Each structure stands twice: as C-alpha cells, then as structure tokens.
Image (cartoon, grey):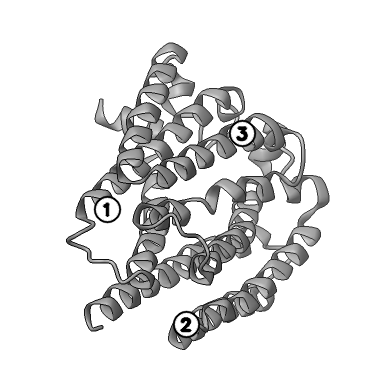
Amino acid sequence: MPKVFFDTIKIGIIKSNLIAMFAGLSLALYVFDASILANIVPIILSVIGSSLIIGAAGVFNNLYDRDIDAIMERTKTRPTVTGRVDTKTGLILGIAITIIGGIMLYIASPSAAVFGILGLLLYVFPYTMWTKRTTVYNTEVGSLSGAVPPLIGWAAISPDLGHYEIWALVVTMLLWQMPHFYGIAIRRFDEYKAAGVPMLPVVKGIRRTYIQTNVYLVLLLFSSFLFWPLSPFIAIVAFLVSLAWLILSVATFDKKETKKWSHKMFIFSINHITIIFLVIIAYSLIAQLIK
C-alpha cells in the first residue's frame, strides 16, 4: 500500500522539488535575517504543505495521462494505469491532499499558499491538460510550474518579492528545465513518438533539440552572474557547473549515439542543479549563523 501511494503522488518529483523549495526558504532566512527557531513552525508547515501540493499535482497528472502512460515503458506500471488506483480513489486522494496541503501552507503564510496552488494549477491545466499534447512548447509551459517551489519557500518566510535573490533562483530554475527535459525527451524518443506526445525531438528532430539545448545552456551560463550581488562564490560555482554542462553537451554529442549523449546530459543536469541548490542552502544558513 505505501508503494502504491508513493508511486501515485510521484515521490521522486516531490523530493527534487522540496530541495528547490528549501533553497528559496534558506535564501529568505538569510536576506531577511530571520531566525530559524522563530520560524520553525512555518518552515515545518511549508515543507509538509509543499509535499502534499506537489503530490496532488502528480496525482492529477497521473489520472489525466492514463492513456499515454499505458503506452510508454517508463510509466506503464503506474498505479493509475494498472488499476491499483481507480479514477474515483485518485480524485479523492488528489483533492484531499490539495486541501490539506493548501491549509498548511496558508497557516505558514497566505502568500506561500497562493504560490502552492498556482504551481498546482499551472502544472495541471496549461501543461498536463493543454500543451503537453498539443505543442512542442510544452516543456517551456511546464517549466513555469517547475519554477514555483523556490517562491513557496521564500513566501513562507516573507511575502516581499522585491529582492533580486529569489528571482535569480527562479530564472535559474526556468532555464535549467529545458535542457534537462530535452535530455529525457531524447532518451524516451520512441515512447513519446508512440504515445503521440509532441516533444521537441519528436516533432523538430534531434539536431534542432541539440541546438536548442545549447542555447539554453548558454543562457544558463550567463544567468549565473545574477547571483553575483548575493555572493561571488555562488555565482562562480553556478558558472563553472553550467560551463561544464555546456562543454559536456558540445564535446560528447554524436548524432549516431544520441541516446547515450542524452543520458549523460540527464545525469549531469541532476548533479548541476543539486550542487547549486546545496551551495545556496549552505551559504544562506552558514552566513546567517555567523552574522
């Protein structure tokens, strides 16, 4: 039963998004010189509330995509496909954890609840129910919801969004998602094609996807300097890992072995964003403690 539940709410996606959320939260603690102990309740509530909201988005996505998930190898064993979770049960679960998660975020901070629900709505409607099946720009649209978790964490500490630090993190998240998901799209090219999902490599080809990947990597490279006013150290780390990613992309691309290349890109993308998040979290918390 626990495995069915965790598969339905997409526990892996929850974990990755929580790191992004905590990066935004840590930044806010540092920028506003806020005490961790004084904010322990909203911190705990925002972590649990975010987990539930992100999980709800996963449930609704699984329910809506049952038909194409049944075709794709990596998704055909999802509980919503195999029948272990039927539509009624899935809807009840999704609605229940949306309400509970939204209430917890609201108690932590009304603005955190707003961003939590916004992220859910962006993922379910513009992405899952509209663009995922209709346009190659589905990745760009999906990136909007993917960039919301840092805003939830920040808003749990303060509703004041007039600070460049949080927007530097949001821009990084927006740009990072494109080469990350392009890598997945190439790895799963045959599955997306069979399911009729118009991912960029399926519709426009591998070469176009390779070029577009590098364009976003260059933009990601330059976006590293957005962190300079916060910390030259963070900016340099972000620049170096982004440069390494770009070099990997250009140096290892082989049009005859695109799936191997895309696998390397996917693995590096996870390491890339994890390093940046951990550095931001460590810097924010340590800098606050030694003020």
Q: Nearer the viewer, mark 2 or mark 1?
A: 1
Q: Residues within 10 Å of mark 2 (few under 14, many from 20)?
A: some
Q: Nearer the viewer, mark 1 or mark 3?
A: 1
Q: Nearer the viewer, residue 33 or 178?
A: 33
Dot label at residue 244:
none
How many angstroms separate mark 2 from mark 3 (CA)?
34 Å
Q: Could you tell me which residue is drawn at 27 percent across and 44 percent down?
A: 45
Q: Which residue is mark 3?
A: 128
Q: Residues within 10 Å of mark 3 (few under 14, many from 20)?
A: many
Q: Could you tell me which residue is drawn at 47 percent across and 41 percent down?
A: 114
Location of residue 242 by image quarter: bottom right
- Quarter of the figure that contains the N terminus: top left
- As displayed, is residue 159 above or below residue 189? below
In terms of secondary structure, where does tag 1 sit?
Answer: helix
Q: Which residue is mark 1?
A: 43
Q: Residue furthest top?
A: 88
What residue type is disc 1 on?
Ile
